[in-house]
Image (cartoon, rainbow, N blue to C red):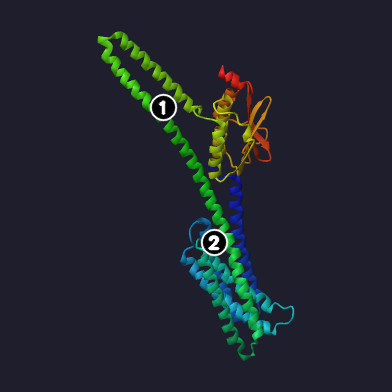
Amino acid sequence: MTAGQPLDVLRRRSRNAVLSSALGWGSVLAVLVVLQPVPDGPQAVLLTGAAVFAVLHAACVRHALRSPTARVPVRLSGPALAVAVCLGVVGGGFAAVAGVDAPPGGWGAGAGLLWLAVPGIAVADVGVGRSRRQLTSATAAVTGVVCLGVVVVTLVLGGASAPWGGLALPVVFGVLAIPLVVYSDFRVLESWRSAAELDRAQRIAVEMAGHRERMRLAEDLHDILGHTLEVVALKSELALRLREVDPERADAEIAETHRLARDALREVRDVARRRRGTELGAEIVAVTHLVESAGIRVTTAGTRAVPGAGTPSSAVLGRVLREATTNLLRHSDASWCEITVREDDGGVELVVRNDGVRATPGEPASGGGLEGLGRRLGELGGRLTAGAAGDGVFALAARVPSSASVRGAS
């Protein structure tokens, strides 16, 4: 049982986006340590802090990739957030002080202000698996702490010579940058989480579809065999009792028992071949609900051309649609499915298409179910074709001529 191909692509792209974001921010931190003009002592502190944060952030990302439906443990996200806040305060404070005397076009505050975005990365790590309200509260709290810390560091380093203009720039940048970084990184992590949840939901839906099919078969067998076997047992017992006193009646009971057993065998075979109670109109409704529950988009067309209930064409096309749906859920990577019914003077045609092909174009479809249905359609003068149609599309077409109803009735 496999997930759909589009879902595999989404999962792979989401994982790559998470890894690219982590590597990108690691590169930014390295560039900031090299380019920002700060004294050797603070530069060593920033370099050490950046290395520690990179390791902690990598651990958070690794946990998010391995367990996308769980929260990142506080033992990882907590220290990462603390280190990120310190980097934002120290780096932003030095950026504000450097911006006072920085020459036009120099790096100065321009590069150093990016330190203020680092806490946003850590907040996104903390927010994985938590509610939006908790994420918003954490973002607001961290933004306030970082901006206040930058003001304090700037006043301590710059003293009375630090102008208010130099303070306004990092504060405004921090108020804007931190929430934006939180939103972007959180969405990247949430896309991976959503892809994993969709994958799990699709697997469960396919398993449930198989379970419902087994339950339906069990119910049909119970309905058919339960009463019949009970009657067979009673008549057999009656025939044994009548064997000595009324042999003719005993023989009649034995013949009736034989007839009941043959009828039960025929009905069981009908159930095994899915010939019991299949009507195209009802199958379209049931299949649409089932396939949509598996996360596959379904469109139908030409439902007015569906043959009337009780006709051989409706029964056999209903079986074709049921078999096509079973193959779609178990053996394809589809994200959409089209069910079309066409009617003309020559008969009725059912076409089922999806984008989950695994075969190469022109390769015939195989499978006992489809082969049996093809023989049944051939008996009615119809035909069944199935296989890859190119561009990743699988098409199944079943046609029943107008004379099928006459043949079935005869």
Q: In which quarter of the image is the C terminus?
A: top right
* The one of 128 and 13 positioned closer to us in this rendering: 128
Q: Residue 34 at what x, y percent from top left? A: 65, 74
Query: Quarter-wise, where is residue 100 in the image?
Result: bottom right
How many discs appear? 2
Residue 338 vertical placement versus 53 (above, below): above
* The one of 117 and 252 positioned closer to us in this rendering: 252
In this rendering, position of residue 352 left or right of residue 237? right
Residue drawn at x 39%, y 19% as measured from the top left: 260
Lower position in the chain sequence, tag 2 or tag 1: 2
Mark 1 Cα within 10 Å, few/some/many (few <14, many 20+)? some
* The one of 148 and 298 positioned closer to us in this rendering: 298
Circles 2 and 1, Cβ within 8 Å, touching? The answer is no
Q: Is mark 1 on a helix, strand or loop?
A: helix
Under mark 1, the amino acid is Ile
Residue drawn at x 64%, y 29% as measured from the top left: 349
Q: Residue 3 at what x, y percent from top left? A: 55, 45
Furthest residue in direction right, as rendered: 104
Q: What element carries label 2?
A: helix
Q: Which of marks 2 and 1 is in front?
A: 1
Residue 83 vertical placement versus 188 (above, below): below
Residue 253 vertical placement versus 101 (above, below): above
Under mark 2, the amino acid is Val
Q: Residue 393 at what x, y percent from top left? A: 65, 39
* The one of 321 and 34 positioned closer to us in this rendering: 321
Q: Mark 2 points at which residue?
A: 61
Between the residue at mark 2 and the residue at mark 1, the CA separation in whole angstroms equals: 56 Å
Q: Residue 210 at what x, y percent from top left? A: 48, 38
Q: Name the residue under label 1.
A: 224
